[in-house]
Image: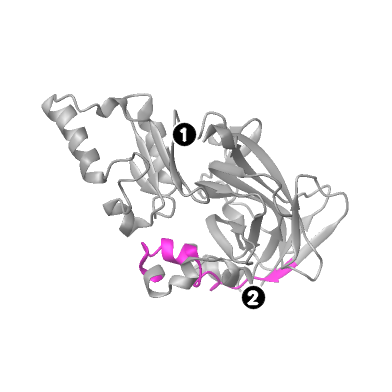
Amino acid sequence: MVGGLNDIFQRGEPLIYEGLKDHTTAKLLIGPWQHLDGSSGAGLPADGVPDLDSLRLAWFDHYLKDIDTGAPSYPPVTQYYTGAERYVTAADWPHPQAKAETFYLHGQFGLPLFGKISGDAPTSNKQTSLLQTPVNGLCSASASQWTAGILGMILPPCAAQDNVVNLLEAVYTSEPLEADMAINGPITGQIWASTTALDTNVTVRVSVVGNNGIARPLTHGIQMASMSAFDASQSRFMNGKLVQPWHPFSAESKRTITPLEPFRADVEVFPTSAVIKAGERLRISVGASDLPHGLSPVRDLLTSLLGALTLYSTPAMPSRVNIPLVPVDAL
């Protein structure tokens, strides 16, 4: 399986590997690619990873011609880590040493761009509100990804930062990290919110803020509140924490969203592999739209237009994000 950190199949490629690995010899290669450059394996060979033509030839020669090319002995998982800017091999996906850590979102009333992230749950009642705008996301890494890289070629600055899209979101930023932090695997945003409308999307973006203030995109996810019920028996938990909810997306699982009544949306944020360097900051931003990725059908769009989304940071409703972390020395 060959895929990219910003591929349109970013979610599915690791899941297909998981579905295959217990039944046959399976390998997973994830590069720093969107869909178009991933098709050619741009930048390979690098860090001991052959170019895609060599990988294909080794596979066909071994399995179709019985030529000993060593293909079965290739590492099971090879992933590119942004931030470290190199490929790293592992015995499985997610990384066998990954453990989920919870990051709590602490909002600032009236200051949606200045929320904080910490490992401590909230001890007071805070909330942040923003308008539900259906067109946010056009200038973002997400828009480039979900057009297979085309918008990124037209507007390269939009694909390289989240600062513009953050302007219409609630933004939570950590203090500068004291040590490097390595992320590997799927992420879940457990967001407590309410809306003045009959429904809303909830988006979660993960980015890295450098000393220059630029928010470098890592990954993102989106979930409609009314369809956010999940089946725990088919979801992924890591050391007891939800990191990949499984949503049925069925008529039977649809929830009624009552205006001003709090709900929790468990948002699946697509898997990534990244290193955040000491001195950089982790940023989580939460919003109500991600165009064109999360454009709702017209009927659902009408139920969420002109609403106000309120995000809660309270002891009873602690909005948080669960992120799988790997020891840096394991890379």
Q: In the figure, is residue 278 to the left or right of 64?
A: right
Q: Position of residue 174 (x, y in %)?
A: 72, 55
Q: Which of the two residues, 276 or 63, is positioned nearer the viewer here? A: 276
Q: How is the image coloured?
A: one colour
Task: State whether residue 229 is above or below residue 114.
Answer: above
In the depicted view, which residue is nearer to us: 90 or 229?
Answer: 90
Residue, disc 1 = 93
The amino acid pointed to by label 2 is: Leu
Above/below status of 215 relative to 278: below
Instruction: Say which mark, if any, is on residue 306.
Output: 2
109 vs 50, nearest the viewer: 50
Q: Is residue 157 above or below residue 31?
A: below
- Provide residue 255's location: percent of width, then percent of height: 62, 52
Which numbered circle lies on residue 40?
Answer: none
Does residue 280 appear anywhere in the picture? yes
What residue is shown at x 58% (from left), y 72% (from top)?
164
Q: Residue at x 36, y 47 (%)?
A: 3
**Residue numbers of the magenta segment:** 129-151
Q: Residue furthest left?
A: 65
- SS at circle 1: loop
Q: Amino acid at mark 1?
A: Trp
Crowding at dot 2, Cα within 10 Å, few <14 / some 14-19 / many 20+, comes out as: few
Residue 259 placed where, x, y %?
Answer: 72, 64
Circle 2 sits in a helix, a strand or a loop, which is it? loop
Residue in front for this viewpoint, 246 or 42: 42
* Image coords of residue 326 (percent x, y): 58, 36
**Residue at image location 41% in from the left, 62% down from the top:** 146
